[in-house]
Image (cartoon, rainbow, N blue to C red):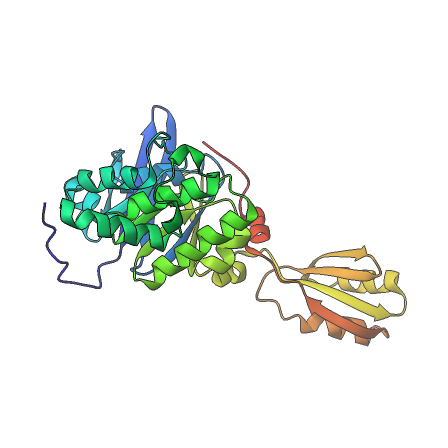
Amino acid sequence: MSIPPDPNNNVPAVQTFALTRVYGPMVALNALNLTVNRGDLFGFIGSNGAGKTTTLRILATFLAPSAGTAQVLGHDVVRDADAVRHVIGYMPDFFGVYKDMEVTEYLDFFGACYKIPSAQREKTVNDVLELVGLSEKKGALIGALSRGMQQRLGLARVLIHDPQVLLLDEPASGLDPRARIEMMAILQELQKMGKTVIISSHILSELETLCNRVAIIEKGKLIYTGPAQGMRDQMAVGRVFWVKIIGDETRAVELLKARPEVNQVEHTEGRLKVTLNDHETDPGCVAETLVHGGLKLIGLEEEELGLEEVFMRVTRGETQ
């Protein structure tokens, strides 16, 4: 099938409109509105059962929505399913491999499935193996590969037809630290090549540095979408500051707790941990209160909230 070029390069890579999926009484996706721009390395974050895999399976045309619509590069996932399959590469969290096949045989087989001409397949296989760092394993049996190498082979398989959008469900699942780092480096290289990469993962610390945009989903509902830094700014319950003083710490706690801008004050390891009510509160109120109270302020440092901590703050761990 020939896919006509998109005349409008401004069409997002992925868009969903009130996307809903129910299984009997259970609502797996609840009117999800999501936009992924072209060229994004997009982190899809949520607890097990939040609806991430259901979303990716709908985008990959393996599952039909109960209501709403979804588009990939302007193609409707239901009406234009064949067109969608030609522009995506989908890697589920668990996928089977033929362990008695050689690496090149395996990729050649899938190249044939995508109707890549036989004269072109050898070069295509070599190119994707080089991209995922498996060129030296061409003749190896798949069963002899490590878990990390098998994951990279799975990624090579979804790249065989040069898709524009990659849907990767927990691609670093079960990998050791070195294999995870290698996988993330490959994903960054794919983004540099102009591909749109959507990756669901529980390794939030890695998504924070890897992805330019993220989304949080819980109980099938979108909680946040935007830059990772924006999530920390927008979703954090309140900014946290570590304060060190010279003087009566008990009095300092009493003074700070009396301020309406302060949510909580804790005395920890010779310092005060001060949590403000919201992100917009001016932290100057902390210094002002202590100095006017006759205490000497010698340290005021904001705590940098990581993606993982913000995620824990804004979600309740609820599943369907």
Residue 78 position by quadrant? top left
Expressed as whole percent of the image width and height from the top left, the position of residue 276 reads: 66, 61
State the residue in front, 282 or 187. 187
Residue at point 13%, 62% (across, down): 7
Expressed as whole percent of the image width and height from the top left, the position of residue 296 reads: 84, 75
Expressed as whole percent of the image width and height from the top left, the position of residue 71 reads: 23, 48
Residue 31 position by quadrant? top left
Expressed as whole percent of the image width and height from the top left, the position of residue 208 reads: 51, 57
Q: Is 17 left or right of 92, judged from the image as shown?
A: left
Residue 292 versus residue 227 in the image, above or below: below
Residue 278 position by quadrant? bottom right
Residue 234 versus residue 16 in the image, above or below: below
Q: Is 153 left or right of 111, judged from the image as shown?
A: right
Check the picture and name the quadrant holding the N terminus. Answer: top left
Check the picture and name the quadrant holding the C terminus. Answer: top left
- Residue reaching furthest right? 248
The answer to whether one can see residue 186 in this image is yes
Q: How many marks?
A: 0
State the residue in front, 191 or 41. 191
Residue at point 40%, 41% (across, down): 52
Residue at point 35%, 41% (across, down): 139
State the residue in front, 64 or 201. 201
- Residue reaching furthest front? 139
The answer to whether one can see residue 40 in this image is no
